[in-house]
Image (cartoon, rainbow, N blue to C red):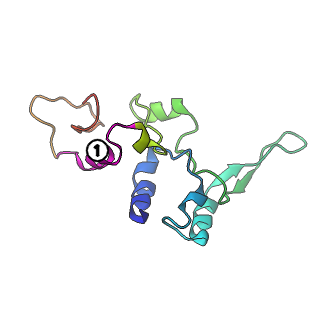
């Protein structure tokens, strides 16, 4: 699990969010309390508005949720050729095949697409991804 989270942070998190996962969920599963706190503190979160209505930034806390790579869906689509990368928080529950689907998806990218398959620039072919 720890290696999986490392892969998420280094690869997947550039496009995909884990919007329903707080940093504290990692404690005892993949990281220690101190490690989870340190990762949370690498990010800035908005404070509640002060008396003047201004919002400031603060370091993350272990109770905060892992931040998304984009501010909103429109920004995510603009950065990904119109495609909206799915949130990965509940992906195994949301896809038929669950963990097996995820494994196939992650390991199913061939060097070259099959003959006769056209793949747009900047995208990749994967036989396990619906619609390809």
Secondary structure type for disc 1: helix
Q: Quadrant of residue 72?
A: top right
Q: Nearer the viewer, residue 83 or 86?
A: 86
Residue at 22 percent of width and 46 percent of height: 108
* Count of residue discs: 1
Please tell me whether the stretch drawn in magenta is mainly helix, strand or loop: helix
Residue 80 is covered by the magenta coloring: no
Q: Residue furthest right?
A: 51
As drawn, 112 above or below 34: above
Relative to the observer, which residue lies in front, 122 or 40? Answer: 40
**Where the N terminus falls, by quadrant?**
bottom left
Residue 40 lies in what quarter of the image?
bottom right
Which quarter of the figure is the C terminus placed in?
top left
Q: Which residues are magenta?
A: 95-110
Circle 1 sits on which residue? 105
73 relative position to 129: left or right: right
Q: Indicate the position of residue 85 as horizontal and vertical percent values.
A: 43, 37
Indicate the position of residue 130 as horizontal and vertical percent values: 29, 31
Q: Residue at x 39, y 64 (%)?
A: 3
Indicate the position of residue 109 as horizontal and vertical percent values.
22, 45
Kindly identify the residue that appears in the image at 27 percent across and 33 percent down. Answer: 121
Q: How many residues crowd around disc 1 within 10 Å: few (fewer than 14), some, or many (20 or more)?
A: some
The answer to whether residue 59 is left or right of residue 128 is right
């Amino acid at each position: 699990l720890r290696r999986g989270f490392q892969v998420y942070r280094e690869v997947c998190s550039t496009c995909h969010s884990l919007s329903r996962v707080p940093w504290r969920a990692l404690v005892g599963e993949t990281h220690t309390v101190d490690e989870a706190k340190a990762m949370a503190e690498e990010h800035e979160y908005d404070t509640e508005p002060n008396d003047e209505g201004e919002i400031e930034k603060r370091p993350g806390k272990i109770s905060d949720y892992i931040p998304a790579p984009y501010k909103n869906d429109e920004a995510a689509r603009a950065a990904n050729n119109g495609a909206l990368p799915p949130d990965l928080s509940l992906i195994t529950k949301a896809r038929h095949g669950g963990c097996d689907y995820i494994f196939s998806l992650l390991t199913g990218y061939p060097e070259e697409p099959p003959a006769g398959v056209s793949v747009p620039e900047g995208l990749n072919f994967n036989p396990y991804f619906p619609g390809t």
